[in-house]
Image (cartoon, grey):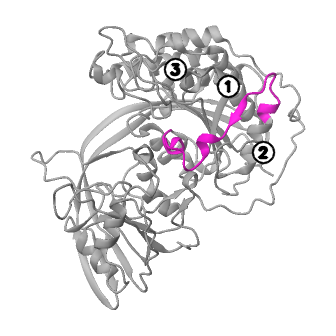
Amino acid sequence: MIAPVTRRWLIAVVVLSLPLAGSAQRGPQFSQDEMKRWLTYLASDELEGRQVFTEGLGLAATYIADRLKESGVAPAGDNGTYFQTVKVLGMRTRSASKVTVTVGGQSRTFVDGQGVTFPRNQGAKQTVSGRLEFVGYGHTFAPLKHDDYAGRDMKGRVALYVGTLAPGMTTAHNRVTTARSRLATEMGAVGAVGQTPIPTGRGRGAGPAAGTAAAAPAPAANPQAVDFQTAQGVDSPVAPQITAGEEFFEFVLAGSGHSYADLRALAAKQQPLPRVDLKDASITFVVDANYDVVQTRLTRNVVARVEGTDARLRSSYVVLGAHYDHVGYQQFAGTAAATAVAIASCAGQTRPTPRPGDLINNGADDDGSGTVALMAIAKAFANGARPKRSLLFVWHTGEEAGLFGSRYMAANPAVPLDQMAAQLNIDMIGRNRCDDPAEANTVYVVGSDRISSELHNLNEDANASLRAPLTLNYELNDPSDLESIYTRSDHYSYASRGVPIVFYHTGLHRDYHFVTDEVDKIEFAKLARIAELVHATATRVGNLDRPPVRDNAGPRVGKGQTGKID
């Protein structure tokens, strides 16, 4: 979470060419029949679930490009095509990284794999130093009023935490737990150290702590084995995030008046942890990893452009995106294990029974719905009123495999990042959350307030201007959202580089990532209305005489908050 700042001001601009909030927007009406026809092909068994690096995804890319060409939407990919080649590199890590800890004038050095564990992707070589700050469990969790960072200034410090689940948390909160290292850096820390868990029935552990670094794998029998895959390279520095074992913690806590054994015992019982003053304890990370490319795999983003009308503003862009890949084949068909899987966000619901022998995850909602909505929006702009700014449309590849396409685009942008006024992302907008009819008018808006409060308000105004405004729900924007939706789709690749974003989503359901996510369950009337909202917001951003103000105020904490930001 970006540290919040006071929101006492917001630059408001009234663009005369736009309708006022509250007036009816007479924008394009999107053809449900056309989107259904497109989706029927994209989510068909012929495309075999559109998994990255497969023929089915290639067929989907070609289909999208052909429809764009028919609609008069210009290509914006490599060499005048609709495609941007995305290189996904399989890397093998050779690590000489280490940390030196100084406590009370005494220093000890721990080498990667010997008392501390660095992630396999450590980023560029660098040296990072900071004072160690014990932050308990390392959580900020509003529903339980638990905040380990309350009253702490983490700027320039390194967060040190133990345990996994804070008091009152359950395994349903695991996604929050795995975000602790990212939370530490968002709170201003220059690095994070978590506890290496101790396996049941054993002494000292060697695995990674949830929420920090992945453990170093055992030496591979195959020297060409892949440690990790990346679509954005390894030449950028990242905040060090490691796990550490018993000797490290005992040394750090020496002289603090608290023993590691006592803290670990309290954490194992999810008891409140004491405030621990580490006095002058400091740490220096020496990140020293070399990487060998042992595999290169190619996939493609689909990229198109509609030029803006204003000679001065057309070199800046509103970027609109969706991902067109999905997860391919299910590895089982109709087994008890498949049908018994419960969806955490849909209490009491279980998987539906699939057709006998059905193995294909068709991904009609995820993200076939966003894919066809984006196709319709691109067509509407190419054949109707265009804003002053240009529009860049990106159908991202490999979102399901780790945001490959959006990370590659953010690292190798088709237009410079500083010319992106905002990015609007569409992922799963064709259903009601948990298939609840009461959600028929609801769209979940995520991230709109985090980087630009003005962008948030523009989206609110765009919605108010529609013939039939939607209910904008911000529950999933809360940092304590159990599904951590904000970090899980392509907008996050842009947001992490400072581009203001809005993410449109209609919630998970029991067909999520299952073979029963099929076209006959899509609510096309709702899909069309959300496309109208995205089109209206893109128009408003596109007609501003300068990009939306980036005030970096962070999310409004607390589920259910609605409306504009004053």
Mark 1: amino acid:
Ile
Element type where label 1 sits in the image: helix
The residue under the point 50% across, 74% down is 156
Cβ atoms at labels 1 and 2 below 8 Å apart: no
Mark 3: amino acid:
Ala
First along the sequence among labels 1 and 2 = 1
Question: What's drawn in magenta, residue-wise?
Answer: 462-489
Q: Residue 455 appears in which quarter of the rendering?
A: top right
Asked if residue 420 can be seen in this view, the reply is yes
State yes or no: residue 235 in magenta.
no
**Left or right: 369, with 45 as reference point:** right
First along the sequence among labels 3 and 1 = 3
**Which quarter of the rendering shows the N terminus?**
bottom right
Element type where label 3 sits in the image: helix
Residue occupied by mark 3: 65
Q: Position of residue 230 (x, y in %)?
A: 35, 46
Mark 2: amino acid:
Lys
Q: Position of residue 492 (x, y in %)?
A: 53, 45
Residue occupied by mark 2: 564
Q: Residues within 10 Å of mark 1 (few under 14, many from 20)?
A: many
| Label 3 to label 2: alpha-carbon separation | 37 Å
